[in-house]
Image: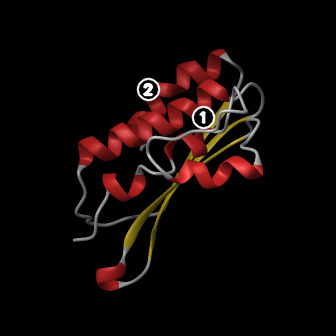
Amino acid sequence: MASVVALLAPQADSKNLYLRSVAEPLGWLEIDPVRLRQCLFNVIGNAVKFTETGGVEVRMSLVGEGAERKLRCEVQDTGVGVPEDAKPRCSTASSRPTRVRRASSAARASAWPSRAVWRG
């Protein structure tokens, strides 16, 4: 996550946005690092791209215990958000809100995490 945030920091700085990252110690995880990095780059990049004022915060933590342990990545931005009636359509990889020109980055990437990371 730190390398993705570092790559996108100049873009955030040029828009006078804050870009923060918070991660708890994760230990060892079985993940596909290429897909995780791609997912983070897409989601964080969209958050920076579609946020006009304020900024973006990225959080990474573990949830669950034992075999049910999962990596949780959250991206919160101060963008315009997604209308309530469009949110159900955001849960599939091929859909995105059509009524909002600059929708929140969370809507665009909500289908990624289950494919980017898996339990070991």
Q: In this view, does 98 lie above or below 84?
A: above
Residue drawn at x 67%, y 34% is: 103
Residue most extreme to the top: 14
Residue drawn at x 31%, y 67% is: 27
List the residue tagged with mark 2. Answer: 7
Q: Which of 25 and 87 is in front in this view?
A: 87
Q: Which of 98 and 103 is in front in this view?
A: 98
Q: In the rendering, at what x and y percent does residue 10 appear?
A: 54, 19
Q: In this view, does 23 lie above or below 100?
A: below
Q: Nearer the viewer, mark 1 or mark 2?
A: 1
> Of the residues shown, which amino acid type is indicated by label 1?
Ala
Q: How far apart are marks 1 and 2 (CA)?
A: 14 Å
Q: Is residue 27 above or below residue 20?
A: below
> Of the residues shown, which amino acid type is indicated by label 2?
Leu
Q: Residues within 10 Å of mark 1 (few under 14, many from 20)?
A: many
**Tag on residue 116?**
none
**SS at circle 2:** helix
Q: In the rendering, at what x and y percent does residue 98 appear?
A: 65, 33
Can you say which quadrant of the picture contains the C terminus?
bottom left
List the residue tagged with mark 1. Answer: 47
Q: In the rendering, at what x and y percent does residue 54 appear?
A: 76, 33
Mark 1 / mark 2, whichever is N-terminal: 2
**SS at circle 1:** helix
Q: Nearer the viewer, residue 20 or 89?
A: 89
